[in-house]
Amino acid sequence: MSHPSHVNQPSIPDDNRIVSVLFADVCGFTGLAEHLEPEVVSELLNGCYQGLAAEVHRFGGFVDKYIGDCMMVLFGAPSGHGNDAERAVEASLALQDFMVQYSDQSLALIGQPLKIRIGIATGKVFAGWIGHEGAQSYTVIGDVVNIAQRLEGEAEPGSVLIEEATYRHVRGLFPCTARGELSVRGRGQLVKAFTVEGGRSRFAVRIGSRHLYGAEVAFVGRDDEIERLRTIWRSCRRESRGYAVSVFASEGQGKSRLVHELLKGLSEDGAVPAVGIGACSHHGRAPLEAFEEIILGLAGCHRRESADVIVQEMGRLVDLAISSPERAKEVTQELIWLVGLGAESVGGASKRESAFGAIGDLLVGLSKHQPILLVLEDLHWAAPQTRSLIRFLSQRLRDAPVLIFCCARPVFLDCEPDWGHDLVRHAHLDLNPLDPASIHRFVEHLLRYLDPPASELVTLIADQSDGNPFYAEELIRDLIDRGTIDVSDATRWTVPGAVSNLEVPASVEGVLQARLDRLSARAREVLQQGAVVGRRFTRSALKALGSVEGPGLNEALSELERKELVFRRSDHNRPGDESFIFKQNLVRDVAYENLLKRQRTSYHRALAQWMEGRRRHETTRSDEALIGHHFELGGCPEQSVQAYLRGARYGEQLFALAESQRAYACARRVLDSAPDLGWDLRLPGTDIYAALAVEMGEARVRLDTGELVLAEAACDRADALMRKRASVFGSGRNLLIRGELAMRTRTSSDDAGSVADLAICARDTALAAGDQSTELSARILLLEESMSRGDLDRGLAELPAIDRLLHETVAAPRQGARLSELRAHLLHKTGDYGAAEQVLREALEDWEEGLREPERRRRLLTQLAEIMDHRGERGDATLLRQEAERLRAPT
């Protein structure tokens, strides 16, 4: 017998729990033992069991007992992990691998290899201490034990057989095939069996089940939508072409469940794709946060992993997708930079704007190995940069087996009324409220264990739910929480009182509020703390907000799970830090609104300080704006402004201008509430005051977005601030922005002189201040202005200084593209067509300007077409002009 290590009997109470039971039997060993010496049998079995037990312990299992040449193993008792069925299957494959390695020893001892059969079953058992006083052992009792042993007996040597409950837990993670139904001695019902065909796919995604207090919840009334999605997926796979689907529905209508059911159907067909799932959040942690999550998921890691692990796994993923070592290295660096890892220089600043291209290349390469399903949830909160990337990928993946699946609330169409028009092979799908017959059938299904049936209660809930499945579920949960429905017997629910006297809350918010009111004080506090963090939260974040690790926190989280308000995310855990998710955003919203203002302030401050402390260790550069948000709500304006400004600069580097502009606006809002702070606070490593940084940052962003009047107004505000404080810090940058504004709006030669004057002043001011970045931009502006007037000598005179600065500082990506355009034009005018062509082709390849600045790319293509004409390559010139014409902005 094997007892739980380091634990005595009183510390493990008897209880009922869900456990995965594994039986492993050495095939044919009884017959072999008849012809072997007992010492050989002992040596062979002990060596075998020692290795098998080590594998069991590696996956968190507990060896219950050895029965001759058979071992019984528990996953989920005496302690559970939240993903015990998955651990059991993974361990079973490791046991089979060990037996293959152990064959050498068995060959040496008995002249033939040994194999094992494995059976696994999952379900509720009694777990506790059995036996007489002084000779008790910890074990489990229940039907599941009998089923697991029967499955083991039916398994082929070297194989793993599981039943339906285990299969539901691991489908999508491991390839399985149906074995049929088996009879089990002493059991009237047949058992559905499945053979595990191999290890976890690199791109596996869990396909779980929805439950209502132990009763699985079916997906009712959406058959047409599911069939339409399956048809689209079959076309995507069969044709190896890209498709896009956008599903629109209000909260609780089943957007996420639709994805779940699609994956469930694909797994049953044996056609599970590589799945990448990402969600947009209300406060927008980063411009491309959903795609960060998708890429990390495809790499088999998450944002809370160590930097070394992420870099290693990202490299493996890219190597699988891209055969060219040089391009693989570039893509890896760009993706690592995208997820916020490392210093600013990771991947080189000249590559920052090729993030879209890197993601596109990665997905094209991966799709050659396996079809891909990309799921983007809560698109109504997506940043403009995310929406742009979806459009780009739809075009880039048009000839790859990739389905882009977008989920959003209808409000999304208010800001994107033409959504889908520029997506390749796009389908629009609305999930409307269920019709009366379907919602009635759904409620009947939810209450199928009522004995006797209560048609009056079914009608009451169906009518009140207004066709919303989530509302119907919450109404029933509310009745169960109140004791109106008794579910103490999992398969026989009862209604002790009269149905006609029931009071049902008038709204889903009212239902949720009533359910939260019935939580224990500790569970309610933990739920509210989680709501401050967001839809997803971790145990470590709760501890940062004051939750003390120990039985109290464990009990609170267990209560929230038991009440089905939050779910444990076992695939996003790391040792010692579990991850959880609210069942619905609406649950999180109601919990958050319950907090008093002083509680919110305290929690937001503590959360921001904790996130700030993690910045050195995790992928947090993309969290800057979110840190600013929490500091602002936490009453810490100085830290808030600093974080917002870092977030704004990060957005500019990604050319996520809308997000950058929003971060600058947030910083201004904070400074408006604390005017002196703008002059007390300077940007790290500079002499620029925060108030100036906000105005000049907005001016730069407005200039990039073409909002020239607003850019000039921001410059005016910056000048007014400098005059008010008699400060010259930042004047070079402001002069440069004014020069670029003048370049955009000039109409005469006098205006050209104004541009030159501003550029020279900006250059000289920056030179005196040692601001090489501003000096470089000012010299490039001078070069552009000189060439616009045909003054090639003046332009050539600027090039040596520009080249010197390029070697001494890092050019921003758009500086590099702009300089390439000017340099090529200069070489073209001086007759050096070969050098001009090389510069243009490198610019088009390196910076992928078409993703952010189509007009600049159009000009580069037009320039290259002119050079091809000069070289007599008319065909190439025509193709280049056609591509340039496609990029022309509509009038």
Image (cartoon, rainbow, N blue to C red):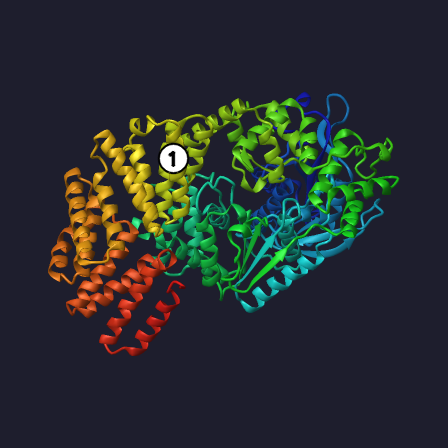
Q: Which residue is mark 1?
A: 667
Percent position (x, y) of residue 373?
55, 56
Q: Residue at x 25, y 38 (%)?
A: 719
Choose top left, top right, bottom left or bottom right for residue 344.
top left
Q: Is residue 425 left or right of residue 626?
A: right
Percent position (x, y) of residue 653?
34, 47
Choose top left, top right, bottom left or bottom right for residue 22.
top right
Percent position (x, y) of residue 771?
20, 41
Q: Closest to the observer: 343 or 183?
A: 343
Q: Can residue 616 be seen in the rendering of this structure?
A: no
Task: For the C terminus, give its image quadrant.
Answer: bottom left
Q: Can residue 499 be seen in the rendering of this structure?
A: yes
Kindly identify the amino acid type of the residue bearing the numbered disc 1.
Answer: Ala
Up/down of 777 relative to 696, above or below: below
Task: For the N terminus, give its image quadrant.
Answer: top right
Up/down of 346 relative to 582, above or below: below
Percent position (x, y) of residue 514?
70, 30
Q: Residues within 10 Å of mark 1 (few under 14, many from 20)?
A: many
Q: Closest to the observer: 605 or 159?
A: 605
Q: Is residue 183 left or right of residue 274?
A: right
Choose top left, top right, bottom left or bottom right for residue 339.
top left
Q: Closest to the observer: 445 or 413?
A: 413
Q: How many discs appear? A: 1
